[in-house]
Amino acid sequence: MSPAPLRLVAAVALMVAAAVHAQTVDRVGPPSWWADAARQRVALLVEGSGLLDATVRVASGPVRILGIEAIAGGRALFVDVEVPAGASPGRCELAVGPARIPWEIVARPARRPEPFGPDDVVYLAMPDRFADGDPANNDPPGGDRLYDRGDTHAYHGGDFAGLRKRLPALADLGVTALWLTPIYRTSDAWADSNVDGKPRKMADFHGYAPVDFYAINPRFGTFDDYRALVDEAHALGLKVIQDQLLGFTGPKHPWRDRPPTDSWLHGPIDRPPQCTFKTEALADPHAREADRRGVTDGWYYGVLPDLNMRDPRVIRYAVQQSLWWTTLFGADGIRLDTFPMVDRTFWRAWHGRLQEVRPGMRAVGEAMVWDAPLLSFFQGGRAGWDGVDPGVASVFDFPMWGAATGVFKGKDPASFLAKGLANDHLYPRPDLLMTMLGNHDLPRLASVEGVTPARLRLAAAFLLTSRGIPQMTWGDEVGLRGGMDDRPDFPGGFPGDPRDAFAPDGRTPDEDRLFATYRALLHLRKAEPALRRGSQTTLAATDETFAFVREHEGSRVVVALNRDRKPATLTMPPELAGPARVLFGEGEWKPVPSGAVLKIPAESAAILGLGR
């Protein structure tokens, strides 16, 4: 794709501002669309002032205007345009009164998405906290000075250039997909935060408070930089998952005080309703509709403007911006923030359109609920009590995260891992659940009281061998501490760091041993299809041990975890009789007439292969 349409996003306000009877155009979205074998219908949102009686025409280019809807008050126009079948890429201009709006037809990239699934391990990287490859963009001119590595709530300088530099290291580690937190443009000013009762200033480094859905955060780089990152990731065999926000926007987005229409946001905007977070009401056929609306129609902590995802105009806008990003920049998957807080009928429509334009593309929804019966309601693949199948095939397995955290910090018996997995019958596709030991919103396991270096290695063995799609968080491989309100930098990713944990000599002995564990397990997972696609059967579940076998096309792999501070001996059933080879760890396998006996050293994991 040529860089021209990408520059248009940032330049449009400067290029099209015109004043005749206070008529102005501030922004247009989407700023471009692709040509295809079939004609494309695109709905443009033109925002500004004095637009109620504005005339709209095509000043240049092959596009055709199909319809115009002016909004009372003159703050927005909806202009439906048609991109002819087989149109040549090139620039166009629309005239809105005396203003000229640059618009572009671009070539559609040929690459199709590679859907993520059980064959993958996803690596979450928050761009600002992973690696700084271009210090020149750390504090762009204009706005507040938001860069300060000494302040956990400020920008730290990570960017696309830093990510690109470290892609080979991630590929060598053995992960197969890269999930980035949102990359939309955010505010250049400090935000006042009091979400957890602690007043403070915070920059929107995390990306979850956009001010423009068709602009990129300049502190991370340009559109061209992002496209280069995606292309280089693909060249190394890494898929890319884009974090998209479709149900809300940032508190400093222009829509906060001046939405395009009166029904654009759930309101009233001067006294916004707060989200109740009572997600159980959504899954309860006997709940009051008002309780369900308290989840889907409320602003997050009363701060993040909540989009009305039942409004046809909002639906069209959200679907288009989702397709625009994934089609033009080549992401393979999508992560959906605050998934339950958006109406399920929207997800059904959105997913259906996604499959038309990007066949096979998968998304994973963030449904932060802690019990399996409730979580299973949100996974796509079957209709709920409401008759709606949201279609989104994957959700994060927060209940399993809770079980694993309790086990590996020593609070709960190891058998709780089996207890958690016993709920798999509730899900349409348990193999598509995304499992994790933490993320950017959760405590890092290394910081949890009771978790030792040995238990970190055990947790890694469980995550990377059990069913589902494992998800790591940046720095898990070296036991990076922090989490929740403390999103740490990856050591060595930033100029001036005293050590480089990307390199062996920059890691402590415990970090290096954990890194070696992750790398060995990740490569073993790639080599053994049973660890990715196999059925899973529990063999032992006691206070201190958990063992299971995974089977796939005649291959069987036994995984045994021993949390105890002394060696453990497990008796294997008759169907596992015969020799075994050690694939990982130091387990001792001895065939006996009744099956086999497996001895495991203290605080360790053993993985053994049986059959071919």
Image (cartoon, helix red, strand yellow):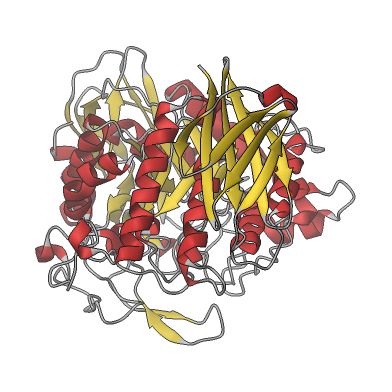
Q: What number of labels is visible?
A: 0
At 49% from the left and 42% from the top, the residue drawn is 464
Q: Residue furthest bottom?
A: 199
The picture quadrant where one finds residue 36 is top left
Q: Is residue 261 visible?
A: no
Relative to 242, 162 lies left or right: left
On the image, the x and y values in percent for residue 309 come to 59, 47
Q: 28 and 168: which one is in front?
A: 168
Q: Is residue 513 visible?
A: yes
Q: 457 and 400: which one is in front?
A: 457
At 35% from the left and 60% from the top, the residue drawn is 478
Q: Is residue 181 above or below residue 488?
A: above
Relative to 481, 577 lies left or right: right
Image quarter in which the N terminus is found:
top left
Q: Is residue 270 above or below residue 325?
A: below
The picture quadrant where one finds residue 468 is top right
On the image, the x and y values in percent for residue 119 come to 46, 30
Q: Is residue 395 above or below residue 190?
A: above
At 18% from the left and 39% from the top, the residue drawn is 228
Q: Residue furthest left?
A: 136
The picture quadrant where one finds residue 104 is top left
At 17% from the left and 73% from the top, the residue drawn is 498
Relative to 61, 322 lies left or right: right
On the image, the x and y values in percent for residue 351 come to 55, 32
Q: Is residue 452 above or below residue 395?
A: below
On the image, the x and y values in percent for residue 202 come to 38, 78
Q: 495 and 35: which one is in front?
A: 495
Q: Residue furthest right?
A: 286
